[in-house]
Amino acid sequence: MAKFTTRELTELFNSAQGAAHMPIDIDDIVTDSRIKTHFGLFIPIVGERFDGHEFLKDAIKNGAVASLWQTDREIPDFVPTDFPLLFVDDTLKGLQELAGYYRKKVNPIVIGITGSNGKTTTKDFFAEIFQKKYKTHKTRGNYNNHIGLPLTILQMEPDTEVLILEMGMNHFGEIMVLSEIAQPDVGVITNIGESHIEYLGSREGIAQAKSEILAGLKEEGVLILDGDEPLLRPLKEKCNTILVGFSDDNDWVVKDIHINDGKTDFEVQNHSYTIPVLGKHQAKNACYAIAAASLFDMKVSDIRSALETIEVTGMRFEKLNAKNGAVIINDAYNASPTSMKASIEVVKQMKNRRKILVLGDMFELGKKSEHYHRSVGDVIEPPITGVYTIGSESRWIGESIKDREADVSVYHFQNHDELAQQLKNELREDTLLFFKASRGMKLEQVIMKLM
């Protein structure tokens, strides 16, 4: 079953040429002309340094059978007269409009997830649970922005029953756009940290930006919140909410948390659960999904078995075996002060005798960068035995530790090779090396040198 026909799309985009009014099947949507496609619709996006319209010939060669086309762009001479072109004022807005149309056509249950930290892992929890009962489609990789989210919607199969969308942002207004495209039945705000504070000014600004998810939330929709975050509590007055957290005044209380042997056990609503990831913050992330599943009458036994077998997206507390019996925890996908401190607390509880942190710069903290890096150093103390930092700003983590005269060895490096060479001396039995930094620090390159 095709997702669209070109004839159908002429009703959405009512200016066209070529054989657009013929019922040509469209089964794939691509914005990258290099991707091989089958019955594909090419959408040429215009960026600051590129213009997708310049690559139409490659798109046709790789299987595109039709294309959106901005009205202000000249049509190349090589385009066959019968090749369907659907004209729009802006191809990005055309992509978003098409995604909204397809979401309405398929009409799945839509779950939108935003938050400063934990979006991807929470998305994985949701997907693992809901696919026990429904045909489920979720955001892949980092397809969570104004281009990636529409493409995620357009990638779902026509018989999808539950669509799980991760919503990322850097600036005000971005979550609003994504929410209006997605029209979620269930919205989730995992937490409010410090990510993007450089652009949003304060944690209050971040909370305001995340609350834009209400823009597209359906009238009868439900918003699931971090109930331990005072900045999110006012949203209770604006829509149906479920508060999840550790304090007893939440609707769903996560308690009796135990971390051991590569897993976290916890209890909520008088039921016990186990997840194969570490941290009380991960128990809360799982509880968002448990609470949502209860809205759709899912069985506790299905929820429990789904959580026990989940595989979370890579580089998120990923356990690796290194040389000489050492263990590496790769949590280097991204970092903020909140997530870094939460992860360090988990490392403290692990059983390894020697615990070494390898920490890099955290980006987008603006003028408060020194303050937030030092705040990470404030929580580092025994049983942490050593800290290696890399980058220009992470040195403040080490300086904070030295200022407190904590009994922790501190080393700082400027490049991957020097850091990796020194870390090789730490690879021994009963040693844990934990890696975390913002994505741009590419700490996985250091890990590869140690493996």
Image (cartoon, rainbow, N blue to C red):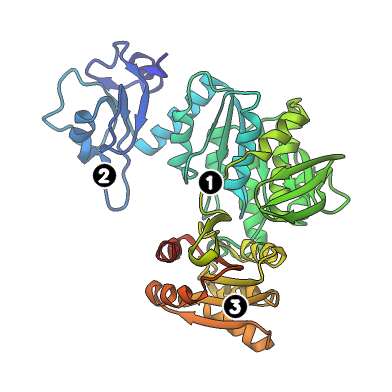
User: Helix, strand or loop at disc 1?
Assistant: loop
Indicate the quadrant containing the C terminus: top left, top right, bottom left or bottom right. Answer: bottom left
Q: Amino acid at mark 3?
A: Gly
- Closer-to-camera residue (272/431): 431
Is 125 on the left-hand or right-hand side of 254? Answer: left
Residue at image point 53% right, 46% down: 313
Location of residue 132 by image quarter: top right
Badge nearest the viewer, 1 or 3: 3
Measured in 3D between alpha carbons, the distance from the residue under mark 2 to the one under mark 3, in whole angstroms, is: 48 Å
In front of the other: 250 or 126: 126
Q: Residue at 48% of width from left, 45% of height from top?
A: 145
Question: Of callouts 2 and 1, which one flags the residue occurring earlier in the amino acid sequence?
Answer: 2
Q: Residue at x 59, y 78 (%)?
A: 386
Q: Position of residue 336 (x, y in %)?
A: 58, 63
Q: CA distance from mark 1 to mark 3?
A: 28 Å
* Outermost left residue: 77
Is 18 placed above or below 349 here? above
Residue sitting at 57 percent across and 45 percent down? 312
Can residue 436 be seen here? The reply is: no
- Labelled disc at residue 313: 1
Q: Residue 177, image x and y in percent?
A: 53, 41
Q: Residue furthest top?
A: 23
Q: Quadrant of residue 443?
A: bottom left
Tell me the amino acid under the disc marked 1: Thr
Query: Which residue in the structure is indicated by mark 3?
Result: 386
- In the rendered view, would you say 415 is above or below 45? below
Amino acid at pointer 2: Asp
Which percent across, then down, holds residue 21?
Answer: 30, 13
**Place of residue 393 in the rendered image (x, y in percent of width and height, measured from the top left):** 50, 76
